[in-house]
Amino acid sequence: MNKALASGIFIISMFIGVGVFLYPLILPAVSQSTNSLGGDFQQSQALTMVLLTLTIGVLLLEMQGQTTSAKTIAAMGLLIAATSVLRFIEVAIPGPGGFSPIFVPIIIAGYVFGARFGFLMGSLTMLVSALLTGGVGPWLPYQMFAVGWVGLTAGLLPQIENPIAQITMLAVFAFIWGLLYGLLMNLYYWPFLSSAVSESAETVQRFGATLANYGAFYLATSFVWDLTRGIGNLVLMIALGLPAVRALERFRDIFRFEVVYG
Amino acid sequence: MKLTFHTFAWVVWLSSAAILTLIMRNPLYLIILLLVARVVQNACGEDHTALKISLWRLSAVIMVFSILFNLLLVHVGQTVLFRLPQNLWLIGGPLTLEAVIYGAVSALILITLLALFMAFNSIVSTSDLIAVIPRALANVGVVILIAVSYVPETLDHLQRVREAQALRGHRIRGLRDWQPIIIPLLVGGLERSMNLAETMVARGYGATSGEQLAARTRAMMLAGLILIFGGWILSFSHWLPGWLLILSGGGFLALAYYEQGRRIKRTRYKISRWQTQDWLLVLISLLPLLLILLPFPAVSEDSITYSPYPLAKIPQFNPLVGLAIALLAAPALLVELSPLSR
């Protein structure tokens, strides 16, 4: 019963995540009604932020069940601190394009310690570094969700023994997430810019047209930016990935050791 | 010494102002909100954030970008400024004044949001924000607390590792040369986390916890999620029932948080009390929201929304609404007037 509920929560929040990130593409196709208050998009943007914040609240509550051991909590805290330091450096000295050093440690932590750990580590890293750099903003729930997914999906990757195959898989994974992250995060502020199209009665937007517009927007604004992020992730993972995975794996065995009193 | 408000009161203020920014498209009200954000930040904020972002420089970028994007891609409106050949992919067609105005209003929304959050960041300190983490999220709260307090030490550790490697003749030329710095940093951090964990266990941490979420709590969470998701989808076609569903879903989630929070005992070192001025701030924050969301006869919807299409016009201005929005600057006035400030 409890298990079924837990997977129910998990599945619904997955749907919400997909819906929230993709709705700007679908909305113009389904909703042509003139709204009484504000633009459709602005309205839904406010609601979407509420929805996302609540969903993250649920996910954090659900996922923290795993972290009851003091060892896991302390390790996660320290790993987040280290990753936030990397983000600190990134914000102070921006790298080329959209490059950010935070993805590689989150992917490695998710891969070694599992999906739940990865989700918590990803989303809490965004939260902690936002708190420290004064970067709390309407984008924070989206970042927490997206980066949480990075860690979560990394935990679902298969465990491979062969080091070359392992690092190849992780590097390709990091590259794909580098691109995907930009694609998802763009969808968050795209509605602010594109809403004009749906409000005018003269142009009836179809899904395809919206997609074409988004494609133009994406190519013009962020493809190169995201590409540097993807390539940066790839290079960083190849350069530092294996020893980091080995180091974390050594600790994983220590963390799992626990004396249970009968 | 300054008059201060409770963190929760500021959260209400921020939510109200942000929601107003998102649902209104009237540039006149948006400008009032932007001014409110700046005034409140000046009066109540302190410079404790590590980073200084120039709002105006960022705003200029957003403005130019948004106007250009809209101008080139949206070919709607009656006041044509310029024509591009029709055969250009996507950007071909008439370029209109209306599209420029629309782009500018969109940018204004983003800039206002940014200014509001900047004000919030400068008013509420990191430790205050951590203090309001709900009791149900105790474990997450501990993780955040550890992370925040270990960041300076990790920076220190990074410096020590770099110095130690430099003494051994290590120099950074390529990316691979970061390996002898990053790996010791990682391992050192994890080793300290082992120490920390042992200290925590020695002081009784985790002695009572370790229980899973109760099925009842989980059921409430699931019901809440389904309700808010359903409400969100419904809100695209039916605005009010959607909001109501989301609200009731939020109620379920609050109940789940309350249930879970009751199982966890936590004591506070620094207690911040809810005072009279906090009630005042909450009331003032909710007033403009109520004025706009509830159907008052004096407030016509035309003045709240504004669309330049099909022909550009001057936005309407309702003094009542403008006044209610300007009220959001009241905390600045309260801080300046209070005897504590002198």
Image (cartoon, rainbow, N blue to C red):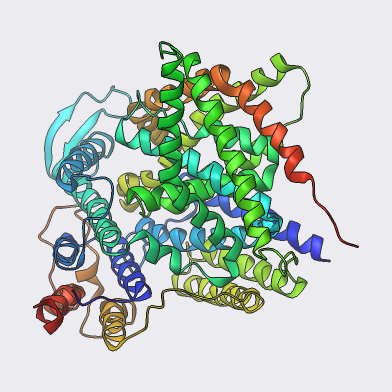
Relative to B169, residue B198 above or below: below
| Residue B19 pos. (x, y %) | 33, 66
The answer, for residue A28, to whether it is visible in the render is no
Image height of A102 relative to A25, above or below: above
Is residue A170 visible in the rendered image? The answer is yes
Give the quadrant of residue A61.
bottom right
Q: Position of residue A14 (x, y in %)?
A: 63, 51
Q: Give me the residue at 21% from left, 63% from top.
A: B45
Which image quadrant: the C terminus of chain B?
A: bottom left
Image quadrant in which you'd find residue B287: bottom left
The quarter of the image holding the N terminus of chain B is bottom left
- Residue at 75 percent across and 56 percent down: it is A7
Residue at far front of view: B167
Q: Is residue B184 left or right of residue A205?
A: right
Which of the two residues, B117 or A89, is positioned nearer the viewer here? A89
* In front of the other: B60 or A63: A63
Above or below, A178 relative to B192: above
Return the residue nearer the eye: A59 or B300.
A59
Q: Nearer the viewer, residue B94 or A222?
A: A222
Residue B212 at what x, y percent from top left?
75, 65
Identify the residue at horizontal 26%, vertical 59% (top origin): B122
Q: x, y (%) of residue B153?
A: 44, 43
Q: Give above or below for A149 relative to A4.
A: above
